[in-house]
Image (cartoon, rainbow, N blue to C red):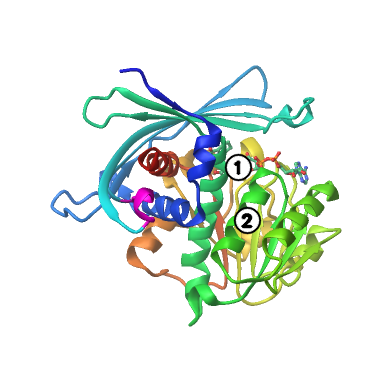
């Protein structure tokens, strides 16, 4: 079998926030294979071993391999208006590089470049190679959206209609996808954008203004991260900063939820220790957290998947953190949704 190649243009045509959010929620919800109840035919499950990280000469050049299987999950059928669910199983492997000098090339390239391999679940043959750079940007934001839905929105009687003030710290690929995805999914009344180089935040503000022209959403570009988060209820932060960009004194009191997705090879650090000291932390994958977050001193409650499965939190702390590492299962279900739609 000659594998099909699906390029970034084809992928982009299929991606919508409802499709990606639903596929990522399925991936997060699936229980780990080792904990599955074989007698429960309703249960979805996943296997995603700890990913490998290979250094391409120095720490600024990384190659990650991310294999994952999701079984017995509900896949949306994008061909029929996203509204029909069917039971699906997907075996995939994302191969992704993080080359942090790419942004300085002329012309610049994204730092994170990915391809997803999809395998025939019956024969193991390679079915398709799919350009995965967009998938990585969308699915990471979608995971933060799902985490915000379960960890923050569910605190309020109006749930997803609750108006929120949103802060985006870092307006690169991840900052942009988080801003676009959050505004497409939730009732964002005010959005505060900060980036180290202000022009990137200005560009994102313009994009949002065009998209939400008819809307009452207020858009602000701030000079400092502190200004951006001062009134924010939901904060998304995705940078390479080795030093904390926000600390506890900068946050408003009361209910606040933070999605932290970045800090490069270290996978945490853009949020200060005093925020972790006052928060509870949920992760996407405990298997990856055991290696990649071993130096993080935080109260890690568990996986967001458990909150989704049980539809409730087991604590009621008002400051929550979703510490995102990135999961192979998310890439698998999103890539499968794209493949099914073509
Ligand atoms: N959790 C996950 O699943 C994923 C995490 N990531 C991580 O997200 C982060 C952002 O990735 P992209 O948006 O693709 O990169 P990008 O290069 O497009 O954007 C990075 C942004 O961070 C800012 N930045 C870099 N160094 C900084 C510093 N020292 N202080 C303040 N701002 C700084 C830059 O101004 C830029 O706007 C990276 O750490 C990356 O490893 C990326 C993909 C998936
Ligand atoms: O999950 C991913 O994909 C990535 N996570 C960390 C940075 C590289 C890409």
Identified at 49% across, 76% down, the residue is 159
The dot on residue 180 is: 2
Quarter, ligand 2: top right
Mark 1 vs mark 2: in front:
2
41 up-or-down from 69: above or below: below
The number of discs equals: 2
Counting from the top left corner in percent of width and height, residue 281 is at: 53, 59
Q: Is mark 1 within 8 Å of ligand 2?
A: yes
Which of 200/65 is in front?
Answer: 200
Examine the rendering and report whether any part of residue 135 can be seen: no
Magenta stretch, residue numbers: 75-82
The dot on residue 267 is: 1
Which of 59/332 is in front?
Answer: 332
Q: Is mark 2 within 8 Å of ligand 1?
A: no
Name the residue at the left extreme. 39
Identified at 35% across, 17% down, the residue is 2
Counting from the top left corner in percent of width and height, residue 229 is at: 74, 65
- Label 1 residue SS: loop
Counting from the top left corner in percent of width and height, residue 7 is at: 51, 30
Residue 314, picture quadrant:
bottom left
Mark positioned earlier in the residue sequence (1 or 2): 2
276 up-or-down from 177: above or below: below
Q: Are marks 1 and 2 in contact (CB under 8 Å)?
A: no
């Amino acid at each position: 079998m000659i594998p099909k190649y699906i390029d970034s243009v084809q992928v982009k045509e299929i991606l919508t926030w409802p499709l990606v959010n639903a596929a990522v929620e399925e991936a997060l919800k699936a229980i780990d294979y080792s904990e599955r109840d074989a007698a429960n035919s309703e249960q979805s499950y996943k296997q995603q071993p700890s990913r490998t990280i290979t250094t391409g000469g120095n720490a600024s050049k990384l190659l990650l391999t991310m294999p994952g299987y999701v079984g017995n999950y509900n896949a949306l059928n994008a061909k029929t208006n996203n509204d029909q669910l069917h039971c699906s199983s997907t075996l995939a492997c994302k191969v992704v590089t993080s080359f942090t000098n790419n942004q300085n090339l002329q012309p610049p390239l994204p730092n994170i470049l990915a391809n997803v391999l999809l395998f025939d679940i019956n024969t193991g043959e390679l079915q398709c190679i799919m350009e995965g750079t967009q998938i990585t940007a969308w699915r990471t934001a979608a995971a933060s959206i799902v985490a915000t839905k379960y960890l923050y929105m569910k605190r309020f009687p109006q749930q997803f209609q609750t108006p929120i003030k949103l802060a985006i710290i870092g307006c690169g690929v991840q900052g942009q996808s988080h801003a676009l995805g959050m505004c497409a999914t939730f009732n964002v009344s005010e959005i505060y954008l900060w980036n180290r180089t202000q022009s990137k935040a200005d560009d994102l503000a313009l994009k949002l203004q065009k998209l939400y022209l008819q809307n009452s959403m207020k858009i602000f570009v701030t000079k400092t991260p502190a200004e951006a988060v001062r009134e924010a209820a939901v904060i998304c932060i995705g940078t390479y900063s080795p030093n904390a960009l926000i600390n506890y004194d900068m946050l408003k009191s009361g209910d606040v939820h933070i999605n932290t997705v970045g800090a490069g090879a270290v996978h945490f650090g853009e949020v200060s220790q005093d925020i972790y000291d006052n928060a509870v932390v949920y992760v996407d994958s405990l298997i990856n957290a055991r290696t990649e977050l071993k130096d993080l001193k935080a109260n890690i409650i568990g996986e967001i998947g458990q909150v989704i499965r049980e539809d409730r939190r087991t604590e009621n702390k008002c400051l929550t953190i979703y510490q995102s590492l990135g999961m192979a299962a998310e890439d698998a279900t999103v890539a499968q949704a794209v493949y099914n739609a073509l």
